[in-house]
Image: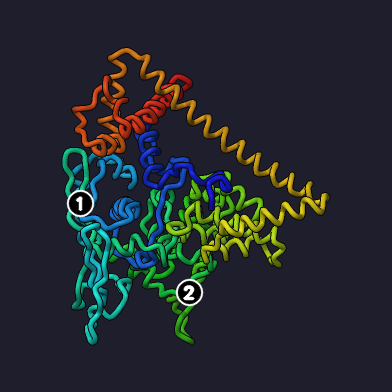
Amino acid sequence: MAAEDNPEEGKSRVTPRQMALALFEDLFDLGMPISEATREIGYQRNNFFTQIVNMGLPARRFLDAAYFIVAQEQEARDQYDVELNYFKWLMRYDSRNKKHFSSVIRSVKSSMLEVMSAPVVSVDAAGRMLEEPTEPGDEKTSAAVDNLDVAVQDEEGDWLELIGRVSVRNGRIRFRVPVELQRLIKDPENSYWTSLLVTSRFTLIYARGIYDHVLPTVPNGITDWLSLDLVRNLPGKSWANNAEFKYFKRDYLEPAISQINELSDIELSYETRAGTPGSRKKDQIRFRLKRKDAAVASKADMLNSVALFMTLQKEFALSDNQFERIAQNRAVWTDERIQQAIEYTRWKIRQGEKIKTAAGYMMKALSDNYRVSEADKQVELIQAQLVEASVGQRESKSERQKAIEASLAAATAADDHRRQEELRLAREFFNAADKIPREELVRKFVASSTMGVRAIERQNLKPAQVTEANILSFPDVSNTFIPFVAGELRKATRARRA
């Protein structure tokens, strides 16, 4: 699809990692946690990870932050290295108690996964994961990698760490993740959208455990009948495992359901029954759940484009379940691919295709990656010209379509102009400032901006080589520094208004 036919094409897009870093830089200095962020932060979480049990809230949040960082990289890495404050902000960890943070790391590292049967995975020189060919009779390589199960400590088997080596030094955290798990984390199939904004709000381990377990079934609206012991054991071994049901319900289950309904993006209820005919003992549970109406609006943030969200909501009237499908496949169904499916559906409608519902047809086009070819666009253009020449009454319809496109283009152009004007003013401010303010801006840029340090490294420079006198002479560094200056000016303006 040509950029001129799609106003969303050709624009630089904000990745989830860039958005998270920008929100961190804006909110961290204000002392605001990730749960107060105004934009969605999350990733596609493989269904397999719903089976993780025997892990407390801080440890679960540690994994959330680590796996979010892993998910943002397309290829596997031997080690991940980020600023410690950023990592703690992602996991909503406010304590400065180093011993407690060390205990959280030990808790994560003590949790193991049993590898029932998995393909042998190796990594090539470019960091891409390769699967070795299986040999007949080799049970170790005869099954898919997602045939992993939660560790049962009294069984024999092969065990896999949830997190590898962790190093915390000089204000940074470095960690490793087993390659087998990296493949699952980066796999867009069999996954669902996990919001760090939501998961960071829970204070009850049963609320978090139940939420993680039922979230993949939101599109279905109901879970299967589950063993009540499974739910009891979500946080691991405790008094609640053997408590009478009436006490477990009062002290753990009901408070957890209440917190999920209050703090999360879903509404949850449950029912219980005796699984054995003739028995009065309630040992099975089933959950009913749905997205909250207000949660649908968060899809605008997920799409990184309000205009695209409004198109899906207003023009195509997508249902909650259809938005949920998009969220679950977000790693593959990018904004470009969604726009492509929209254009294809519009094109089919213009061609007179018999379509039952535009929303359903658009979702089919999105799933199967349909798009309008350049040749088809030319055919449509020629046909339109012939029809316009012979049938004048169709001109008004064409003009309305052009007016809509012109309106969207004007709105996009105005937004681009605003951003460019903000960058121009930031550059002028820096050029006109005295040496001391300029040096202070460069110092903060190097000290607090992870993206800034990487821009300097891409320029084959060291931070010490960048000064207020030469920073604008390096293209990669300048392109990152000027938006940083614009952000500092916005902070200063908000502070004055406050």
Report x, y in % for residue 431. Answer: 36, 17
Which structural element holds mark 2?
Answer: loop
Report whether residue 201 is seen: no
Task: Please report the residue visible at 43 percent of the width from the left and 43 percent of the height from the top.
Answer: 14
Amino acid on which disc 2 is placed: Asp
| 264 left or right of 413 in image | left
- Which residue lies under the disc numbered 2? 224
Task: Please report the residue visible at 41 percent of the width from the left and 27 percent of the height from the top.
Answer: 486
Report x, y in % for residue 226. Answer: 43, 74
Q: Distance between the residues labelled 1 and 2?
A: 36 Å
Marked residue nearer the N-terminal end (1 or 2): 1
Whether the residues at callouts 1 and 2 have beta carbons within 8 Å, the answer is no
Amino acid on which disc 1 is placed: Ser
- Which residue lies under the disc numbered 1? 103
Count residues near mark 2 (Cα–Cα under 10 Å), then give few for <14, some for 14-19, many for 20+: few
In the depicted structure, whether residue 148 falls above or below residue 442: below
Count residues near mark 1 (Cα–Cα under 10 Å), then give few for <14, some for 14-19, many for 20+: few
Report x, y in % for residue 295. Answer: 54, 51
In the depicted structure, whether residue 255 falls above or below residue 241: above
Which structural element holds mark 1?
Answer: helix
Q: Which of 468 and 185 is in front in this view?
A: 468
Task: Please report the residue visible at 28 percent of the width from the left and 15 percent of the height from the top.
Answer: 436
Q: Nearer the viewer, residue 336 or 204?
A: 336
